[in-house]
Image: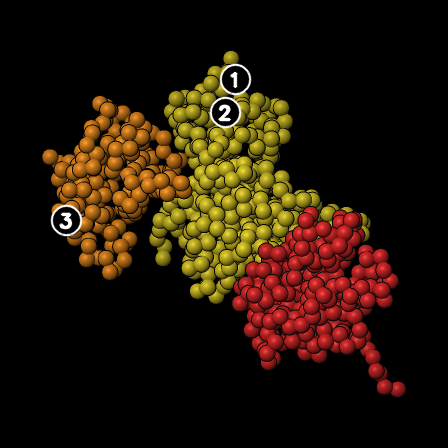
Chain colours: A red, B orange, C yellow
Amino acid sequence: MAIVFEKTKGLTDKPFHYCPGCTHGIIHRIIAEVMCEQDILENTIGVSSVGCTYNNYEYFACDMAQAAHGRAPAVATGIKRVHPDHTVFTYQGDGDLASIGTAEIVHAAARGENISVFFVNNAVYGMTSGQMAPTTLLGQVTTTSPFGRDSGLQGYPINVSEMLATLTGAVYIERVMITDFKNIQAAKRAVAKAFRVQKQGLGFSMVEFLSTCPTNWGKSPVESIDWLKENMVPQYPLGVFKGKDLEV
Amino acid sequence: MIDYSIILAGFGGQGVLSAGKMLAEAALIEGKEVSWFPSYGPEMRGGTANCSVVISDQVIGSPVINDTDVLIALNRPSLEKFEKQVKPGGIIIIDSSLVKTGTTRKDVRFFPIPSSEIANELGNMAYATVVLLGCLSAASGCFMREAFEKALYDVLPERRHHMIPSNLDAFDQGVQLVKK
Amino acid sequence: MNKRILMKGNEVIAEAAIRAGCRYYFGYPITPQTEIMHYMALTMNKAGGTFLQAESEVAAINMVYGASAAGGRAMTSSSSPGISLKQEGFSYIAGAELPAVVVNIVRAGPGLGGILPAQGDYFQATKGGGHGDYRNIVIAPASIQELYEMTVEAFNLADEYRMLVMILGDGTLGQMMEPVLFREEEPIVESTKEWALTGNKGRVHNSIQSIYINPDDLEAKNNELQAKYRAIEEKETRFEAMETDDAEVVIVAFGTCSRICRNVIRQAREQGVKVGMIRPITLWPYPSEVISELAKDSSVKAFLDVELNAGQMIEDVKLAVNGVKPVYFHGRTGGNLPSQKEILDLIMNIHKEVNQ
């Protein structure tokens, strides 16, 4: 009998600790698959950040560093300067990247740091139990915006991809969503493109994944996917914000 | 010689820091221990500059000077600020082209030297501090002309070596004024 | 080559680092240490390394974390307010057991404070600063020649013990020039760094991290760190004893302060008062033992701790003296330095007091 599906060698055998319906597992798998397909697993160094994925250094089978909250782009910069020929990526959530780590991500992009950033946006702090994130939608109820995010009190969501796309050093930026087979395949193509951009030394690349958090959203996995499409996509439209015509 | 100390002070741009460095280089060439410590930070922005140089036959204690053997003052505020720190029997040298007052101290050797005028005659104001270094050398003996000449070759980039004879001329005029 | 040359302290640190094989420098401008950056900017690329001006001190220390995790010899430098910002990174470096060299050219605080020399960061440097139970080796040079030799050594110690080594200077040391004699060849101790992130070719993947969710694992990690720290206390404690054999008053001072006190010893002895000095060279590990021994010595009547702060190291001196002899203190703050005369006068008074 032919094997039609196999777990990727890009992941270790350690079982994920993520909640049911969480999309981190899918994102991990597609990154791992791309590393194997591009045959770069042995030359890739990843950086875990702080949040639900704090320990994904145990899941990815490549060398990994774990960074302080928000500092992954700086840590990745240090690694990349030592190993310019290796592929270096960070894996960051919205609190990590778009709140405490804004300086690090903006300047890594501005420097055209030749790294790939995988930015998982689920509009909430997951690990610390559902606080408001910089990407929380207006009106969205969280444990720190219990009456719904109010622009007068808490300001507006940050569209990170659009913001970073204004920087010359950022060469490829795309937003995808982890909702269904077609979109997951598109997300995988984006990951593959980000790694190729880096391999060719073109500069900073980032893929933003719109993602669900059923636990903190208080919804079932299926409801969460519907909510994402109905509410997040209007605020965070999918598409390529930089490097659309980039042939890699 | 144990911890012989010199304070050079003036406005920023008069070259007191470089003059201090030349002095330190010359002493180093003579095999002495030496330290150079500049004023830094807001003082530089405010337009005044000074540095402390210590020369010694043994390991130098403090590079920071409280009581100095020599004060070289290139403006009046520097003279007023530092003259009380000069040890009794010490030396005060001023650029008398710029500082029109004398010193209030009666217990020091005082040398008013018109170094800016001399530098002007030599065609480059940068020589003013060199005249004063010549004066320092002659008045104190804390370093010699030969070492100063070697230091010029060490410190000046080759494209500036044509200036060395004029530097030595300025130095010698400082020496002569002390001998008078 | 065997010629002493006049160089500024900050430049000597940078030159020493490059000679020691440091190839990754990340920094952010702040007075009075900026010449380290200037020198690195001019020379690091020529040496085949990376000089990078980071967006903040926070980013700079995390770049050091990354470069060191990747196996490079990396450093950053700053001055007090910037060092405060780096404390998060220090703690992570300690937890992840990464080698790193950090230079703090201390200026007067608190807050933005001033830019003139101070030693007000003693507590921060030696007692932590960041969160958790950790130590950094802290070296306090007192001359430009020492800045050179100890910076080179710092890289070896950092690699050997996989930890952060801090060079604690001050504005005087950073800004002053003194002759320095460079060695033909530096005593670089190469280490293999099997733990480094280099790509997992032919081996199980490596990870560099400081998180242990299981309390037993974290306690075991802490025990391991503490055992390492005890070994360092045994092996790496350094100090200079000056004229302590017959001293009645023993000064304890480090860095620039010890330079000023060196002159005072001479002046006091000229006036017939036997003064000596213990100059801690490592501030952690602290040379407690020699101070304890001296405290028990019957010829020693008192200690005088002199610092450019309101009294920080004095706590370590008092712990070592353990109430056996009186410990006096003299400190200046704000960027002011004590004059030799004020220290000498104090010593004369102490001498009178303890001989009554």
Q: Chain of mark 2?
A: C
Q: Nearer the viewer, mark 3 or mark 2?
A: 3
Residue furthest to the right: A1
C-beta proximity under 8 Å, tags 1 and 2: yes
Residue B20 seen by the camera: no
Q: Above or below — where is A89 with respect to C298?
A: below
For label 2, the residue is C249
Is residue B149 depicted above or below A240 in this figure? above
The quarter of the rendered structure image containing the N terminus of chain C is: bottom left
Q: Residues within 10 Å of mark 2 (few under 14, many from 20)?
A: many
- Pointer 1 residue: C354
For image coordinates 53% across by 42% down, the residue present is: C80
Of all chains, the one bearing label 1 is C
- Secondary structure beneath dot 3 equals helix
Which amino acid, by three-letter code, is at mark 1? Val
- Residue type (three-letter) at the residue carrying disc 2: Val
Q: Residue at x 40, y 25 (%)?
A: C341
Give the mark, 1 or 2, whose residue is nearer the N terminus.
2
Amino acid identity at mark 3: Leu
Q: CA distance from mark 1 to mark 2?
A: 9 Å
Q: Have a look at marks 3 and 2 and say if they share a chain.
A: no
Mark 3 sits on what residue?
B122
Question: Whole-percent x and y of residue A76?
Answer: 62, 62
The residue that appears at 32% across and 28% down in the rendered structure is B85
Dot 3 falls on which chain? B
Task: Tell me if label 3 and label 2 are in contact, CB under 8 Å.
Answer: no
